[in-house]
Image (tube, coloured by chain):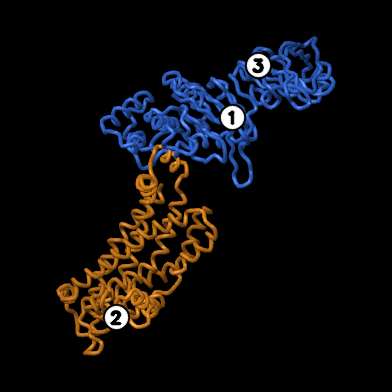
Chain colours: A blue, B orange
Amino acid sequence: MGRIVLEKVTKKFEHVEVIPPLDLTIEEGEFTVFVGPSGCGKSTLLRLIAGLEDVTSGSICIDGRETTSLPPAQRGLAMVFQSYALYPHMTVRKNIAFPLKMAKMDQAEIDRRVTTAADVLNLTDYLDRRPGQLSGGQRQRVAIGRAIVREPSAFLFDEPLSNLDAALRVGMRLEISELHKRLKTTMIYVTHDQVEAMTMADKIVVLQAGFIEQVGSPLELYRAPCNRFVAGFIGSPKMNFIEGDEAAKQGAHAIGVRPEHIKVSATEGAWKGVISVSEHLGSDTFFHVHDTGLAETITVRVDGEVSFDHGDTVYLTPRDDMIHRFDANGLRI
Amino acid sequence: MATQHSRSAARLMMAPAVMLLLGWMLVPLIMTLMFSFKKYLPLRGGDLGWVGFDNYIRFVSSSSFWPSVMTTLIIVGGVLLITLVLGTLLALLLDQPMWGQGVVRILVIAPFFVMPTVSALVWKNMFMDANYGLLSYLWEFFGAEPIQWMSQASLTSIITIVSWQWLPFATLILLTAIQSLDHEQLEASEMDGATTLKRFWHIVLPHLSRAITVVLLIQTIFLLSIFAEIFVTTAGAFGSKTLTYLIFQRVLESQNVGLGSAGGVYAIILANIVAIFLMRIVGQNLDK
C-alpha cells in the first residue's frame, strides 16, 4: 500500500517547462517531504501526483497501478489543502463524511468512520459546528479528518501549516508526525520551511526550478549536502560559504561551514573579526561577524551562555571535520 | 466639538436632498391614501366625497381581482424560474475561461440596457408576429402552423420577454458569486470523488444560495410592478392582466381614481412585505 513511482514525469504550462523529466520513488509508509523555495515546482509535483494537473509526459504508478490518466478520485489518495478547503455550508460531521458519501458508502459505516476519525483528532465536541466557528488548528484537523476517513493509500499535504501561527504550527507538526507513526501510511508533504522538512521527514526531496537537487534522510542532507544549494537550504541559520584564498587552501572553489561548527574565542583562532549583531534566543546565541578578511559576513551559533556584544573582537575557528568543500559548479567534492 | 459641528453641518447640507426625496415619496403616498377613501370620478362628477373602505371592498370583490393576482403570480414565478435556472447555467458557462470573454460578457448584459417598451415591441413585432415574425418563419420551416403569440399564448409571451430582460441581471449576480468560490474547495471535492454534477449540487449551489436569494427578492420587487411589457403587447387582454395593470385600468380606463388608489395601497402593502424580507437578507449578507 502506498508506493508511488514517478517515471520521466514532465509538466509544461503553455511553453514553460515547470517540471523537467523527473524520476522519483516514494516507498511504502514513508513520510516524504518536498521542500524548496517558492516557485520551485513542489506544489505542481504534488498536484501531478494527486491528478489535479495532467502530466505532459511520463508516468505515475501508485501501488504498481498505472494512474497517469486516472481522475483524482480513483487514485486512492487524499489531500489536505493549504486553505483547508472545507465546505463552509456543511457541519464538521458532514465535511468529514463527504468523501464517504460520494463513494456511496453504507450510512452505518460512515458514522463509524467519522466517529473514529473525530476521536483520533479530538474533534468529537465540534462535530455539529460549521468550519466558520472553528479556530485555524481545528479547521486543519477537520481537513485531516476528511482525508483519513477515506483510508487512502497515501496522504498529500500541500503546505498545510502555513496559515497557522508559530505556536500552533509546532503543535500541528507533532500531531501530523504522530498520525504518521500511528497510521503508517505513505505521506507526501510539501513545504517551503526546512524546519518542517527536517523534523517530520523520513525522506526529504529538495527541489529547485523543477529539478530534484537531492533526495535523502534529513541527517544525510544535513551532513552531506551534494551541492551548494542543498547545503544552503537545509540547516538554520544558513551555512556560511567562503570563496577565494581560504577555499583554495582547502583545494576547493568554495567551502561551507555551518554556524554551529565554528568555535568562538576571545583570544585565538583562525579568523579574526568583529561582531556586528548578536541575536540572543536564550538557548542559543547567533553572532554575525564581519571584517574577518573573508568576503562574507560569517554567522556563528554558540551556546546561549556565551556573551559577546556588538563591536567585540572575536576569533573564529571552523571544525576541520565539518568543512564542506564545493567545486566551481557548486558540487560537493 | 469638531465632530459635533461637522455632524450638524453635514445634516444641514443633506437636509434639502432628504426633504426632496421625502416629499417625492410622501406626497404621492398620502394622495393615494386619500383618494382610496374617496369616490373620485374625474369625468363623471369629480370628487363625490368620502366613502370609507368602500373602494377597498369593491377592488377585492371585483371579478377581475383574483385572476389578476393569479396572473401576477404566474408571471413573477415564471420569470424567476427561467432567469434563475438559465442565469445559473449562463454564469457557469461564462465562468469558463474562453476566448473573447470580455466581449461575450458585455453582450450578455446588453438586454438589461434596452428599455422595457422597446424590448417588448421588438419581441412583439420582430419575433412573435404571426405573419412576419421570425418565430413564425421558424414554425413554418418545420411545417407547423405559426402561433398567434399575443392571443394564444399571451402569458408565455410576456414571461419570455420579461425573462429576456432580467436574465442579464441574474447572470451577472450569479457570475460574481461563482467567481468568489474558493477553487481549492472544488479541487478538494474532486479528490473526494464528487462527479461534476455532485460538485455542482453539493459545493457550487450552496455557495450560490445567498446570491440566489438576493436575485429572487430584488427581481420579485421589480416584477410585481411590470407594466410596459403588458401595455405594448396585449394591453391586458387574453388573461394577461396583472394587479398593476388592473390598477392602471381602474384609474385611467374606468376613470375611477378612488378604486384604483385602493388597489395601489394593496400593492404597496405587498411590495413592503417583500421589501422587509429583502432588507433582512441583504443585511445579513453585509454582516458576514
Q: Which residue sits at x=39%, y=77%?
A: B134
User: What residue is shown with label 1?
Assistant: A23
Q: Name the kind of residue labelled 1 in the image.
A: Asp
Chain hosting mark 1: A
Q: Nearer the viewer, mark 3 or mark 2?
A: 3
Is A290 located above or below residue B164 in the figure?
above
Residue A326 found in image quarter: top right
Q: Nearer the viewer, mark 2 or mark 1?
A: 1
User: What residue is shown with label 3?
Assistant: A223
Q: Name the kind of residue labelled 2 in the image.
A: Ala
Is B183 located above or below residue A319 in the figure?
below
Q: Are marks 2 and 1 in contact (CB under 8 Å)?
A: no
Question: On the picture, is B197 further left or further right than A198?
Answer: left
Viewer-nearest residue: A150 or A200? A150
In the drawing, what numbered circle is on residue A40?
none
Chain hosting mark 2: B
Residue B81 found in image quarter: bottom left
Q: CA distance from mark 2 to mark 1?
A: 75 Å
Secondary structure of the residue carrying tag 1 is: strand
Of label 1 and label 3, which has the lower sequence position? Answer: 1
In the drawing, what numbered circle is on residue B235?
2
The local crowd at label 2, few if under 14, some if 14 to 19, many if 20 or more residues have their Cα within 10 Å, is some
Residue at mark 2 shares a chain with residue at mark 1 = no
Q: CA distance from mark 3 to mark 2?
A: 89 Å
The local crowd at label 3, few if under 14, some if 14 to 19, many if 20 or more residues have their Cα within 10 Å, is some
Question: On the picture, is B258 further left or further right than B106?
Answer: left
Secondary structure of the residue carrying tag 3 is: helix
Q: Nearer the viewer, mark 1 or mark 3?
A: 1
Q: Are marks 3 and 2 in contact (CB under 8 Å)?
A: no
Q: Position of residue B253 (x, y in %)?
A: 26, 84
Q: How many marks?
A: 3
Q: Name the kind of residue labelled 3 in the image.
A: Arg
